[in-house]
């Protein structure tokens, strides 16, 4: 194998992609490649480039798309129709991720933040593993994983991805500046098995110097393996410190310049200490000159004679990009690799939101638009006078698991004066977190509401949604359309019970208010006041609460958090009586 030379017509991002893909094809320990901020339209050509490198001189590797609708049945095993001496029968064979035929398969994840639980489990089990064990009905397989993974994620979404999954991707590149990917590029090397270069103690020492003392073992191993792959691609038998620095620059880590050797220093010249070593997540000091660095007394500022030449990658990969999760503030689920408990009866295809389509296996839950579109493509070939739909045209919906629990929060921001309702809401939020309940947040009286006479609401998949935290600390406004908020809460609950039926096992309605609704329901519907308000807003709130009390109380629980405001401290209790709710003390030591 000869030393790689760079094509002058190749852009920096494409050159970095090719080098990363060749390293991943060469070393199975580098099977995961994660690209940050790649444009969606470039996912297909980039995956095609990776598949061509995996295939070498032969046909490209088979691409396996993974997304929000991926299930375990689609990954580990598949059925094949074979001819036997006594007839035709179905045979269970390994699935696309563990297939042993042809070049290594390529799993493509266009959006890592929305990967299904089944796809996440597959990535955690396969990436970086030495052996995979598959136990499926009719199939038992123990083999070495061969699949390579290509995932794409936005930098702002990295906090939503579980650390178990991020740590499995050894190669990480930021390519926000990538605009085109040349198709049909000639491959100068093939992923044929070759002896990997040998790493020594100097390699380990240089890796630790580059990453700093705060790096974990997975990051150190990933950088060392990447340096080994680069040395092998360059035809070297031993990994040097220069290969470690090249590997760091390839994934976007700035490398501090090494101090000059001792013999090159002149007599009487003091050694200048190097800048501090970079650390994972350090966005300000990595590769920068230290402000506390001692300066000779005769040193004076000079004008630059030309544009500065930075060390490391260009603007497309700023420092710190390989590990943006170090600066992420989003919370993670406690059990991200476990499916929610399912206690429902009936066909699974009839539950949950539609997230995709697939070829139908029966006549339940057909995707009519996709079916008609597939049939329309083949009408001219079939030659029928009338529009014909055959069995191969049928497609069914793929649905995400529907939540079994629902928490509806009605937040009255005008009742927050000198107290924090976080302590009162913590038990309900903890319940929603542990049960993975869906959330519906309804806000009234917010300072930044588009229309202060109407309530605003949004749906969230769980309590970790950033919008939920922002809603808990919204500034208070002037108007309180409490009646409109209660009406919306009742509509949400009725819709949930009607659409999910018996699948909805438990629901909570939590109302945090002082009961002082000063906007009548008619004003909320029309968007303007029609005269003096008086007590009309409070009366409308009681009228809107009455239908909620008639809902299924076997599965619905209602609580009113008392803000303990005076005067009119009995309004929350009167509202709780209309709702059939339990009153929760909002502030300790402040009786109503």
Image (cartoon, helix red, strand yellow):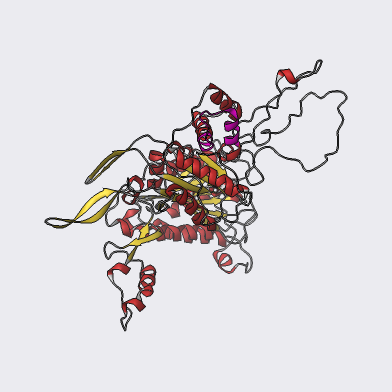
Residue found farthest to the left: 86
**Magenta-drawn stretch, dominant element (helix, strand or loop):** helix
Give the position of the C terminus as an image quadrant: top right
| Left-right relation of 358 to 515 | left
Which corner quadrant of the image does residue 356 belong to?
A: bottom left
Q: Please say whether residue 243 is one of the residues in the magenta stretch.
A: yes
| Left-right relation of 374 to 290 | left
How many numbered tags mark residues here? 0
Residue found farthest to the front: 2
Residue found farthest to the top: 268
Q: Position of residue 500 (x, y in %)?
A: 36, 58
In this rendering, the answer to whether 299 lies above or below 534 is above
Residue in the foreground of this view, choosing between 332 and 304 = 304
Q: What segment is highlighted magenta in the picture? A: 229-248
Residue in the foreground of this view, choosing between 340 and 106 = 106
Q: Position of residue 42 (x, y in %)?
A: 54, 56
Q: Residue at x 43, y 44 (%)?
A: 148
In this rendering, the answer to whether 261 lies above or below 147 is above
Q: Please say whether residue 8 is one of the residues in the magenta stretch.
A: no
Residue found farthest to the bottom: 385
Asked if residue 513 shows in the view, the reply is: no
Q: Position of residue 446 (x, y in %)?
A: 61, 53
Asked if residue 433 shows in the view, the reply is: yes
Q: Position of residue 405 (x, y in %)?
A: 39, 49
| Left-right relation of 163 to 365 | right
Residue in the foreground of this view, choosing between 417 and 499 = 499
């Amino acid at each position: 194998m000869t030393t790689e030379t760079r094509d002058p017509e190749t852009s920096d991002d494409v050159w970095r992609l090719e080098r990363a893909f060749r390293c991943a094809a060469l070393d199975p320990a580098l099977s995961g490649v994660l690209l940050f901020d790649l444009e969606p339209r470039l996912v297909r050509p980039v995956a095609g480039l990776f598949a061509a490198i995996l295939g070498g001189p032969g046909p490209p590797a088979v691409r396996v798309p993974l997304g929000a609708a991926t299930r375990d049945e689609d990954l580990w095993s598949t059925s094949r129709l074979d001819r036997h001496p006594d007839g035709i029968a179905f045979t269970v064979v390994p699935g696309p991720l563990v297939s042993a035929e042809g070049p290594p398969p390529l799993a493509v994840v266009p959006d890592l933040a929305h990967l299904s639980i089944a796809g996440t489990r597959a990535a955690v089990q396969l990436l970086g593993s030495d052996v995979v064990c598959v136990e499926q009905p009719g199939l038992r397989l123990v083999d070495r994983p061969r699949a390579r993974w290509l995932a794409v994620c936005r930098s702002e979404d990295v906090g939503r991805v579980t650390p178990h999954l991020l740590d499995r991707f050894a190669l990480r590149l930021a390519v926000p500046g990538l605009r085109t990917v040349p198709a049909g590029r000639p491959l100068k090397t093939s992923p044929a098995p070759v002896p990997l270069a040998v790493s020594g103690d100097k390699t380990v020492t240089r890796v630790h110097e580059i990453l700093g003392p705060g790096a974990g073992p997975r990051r150190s191993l990933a950088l060392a393996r990447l340096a080994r792959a680069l040395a092998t691609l360059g035809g070297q038998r031993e990994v040097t410190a220069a290969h470690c620095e090249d590997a760091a620059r390839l994934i976007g880590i700035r490398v501090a310049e090494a101090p000059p050797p001792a013999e090159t220093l002149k007599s009487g010249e003091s050694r200048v200490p190097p800048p501090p070593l970079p650390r994972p997540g350090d966005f300000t000091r990595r590769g920068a000159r230290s402000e506390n660095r001692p300066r000779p007394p005769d040193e004076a500022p000079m004008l630059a004679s030309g544009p500065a030449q930075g060390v490391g990658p260009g603007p497309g990969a700023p420092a710190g990009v390989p590990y943006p999760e170090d600066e992420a503030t989003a919370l993670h689920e406690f059990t991200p690799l476990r499916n929610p408990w399912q206690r429902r009866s009936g066909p699974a295809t009839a539950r949950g939101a539609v997230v995709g389509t697939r070829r139908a296996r029966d006549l339940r839950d057909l995707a009519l638009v996709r079916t008609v579109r597939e049939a329309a493509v083949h009408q001219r070939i079939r030659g029928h006078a009338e529009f014909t739909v055959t069995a191969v045209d049928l497609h069914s919906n793929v649905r995400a698991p529907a939540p079994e629990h629902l928490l509806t929060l009605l937040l009255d921001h005008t009742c927050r004066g000198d107290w924090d309702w976080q302590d009162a809401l913590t038990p309900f939020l903890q319940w929603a977190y542990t049960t993975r309940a869906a959330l519906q947040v309804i806000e009234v009286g917010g300072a930044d509401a588009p229309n202060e006479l109407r309530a605003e609401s949004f749906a969230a998949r769980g309590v970790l949604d950033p919008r939920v935290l922002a809603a808990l600390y919204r500034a208070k406004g002037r108007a309180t359309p409490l009646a409109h908020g209660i009406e919306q809460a009742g509509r949400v609950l009725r819709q949930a019970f009607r659409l999910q039926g018996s699948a909805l096992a438990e629901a909570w309605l939590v109302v945090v208010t002082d009961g002082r609704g000063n906007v009548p329901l008619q004003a909320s519907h029309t968007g303007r006041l029609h005269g003096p308000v008086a007590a009309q807003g409070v009366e409308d709130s009681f009228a809107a609460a009455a239908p909620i009390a008639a809902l299924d109380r076997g599965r619905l629980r209602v609580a009113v958090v008392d803000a303990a405001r005076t005067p009119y401290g009995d309004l929350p209790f009167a509202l709780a009586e209309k709702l059939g709710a339990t009153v929760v003390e909002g502030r300790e030591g402040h009786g109503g």
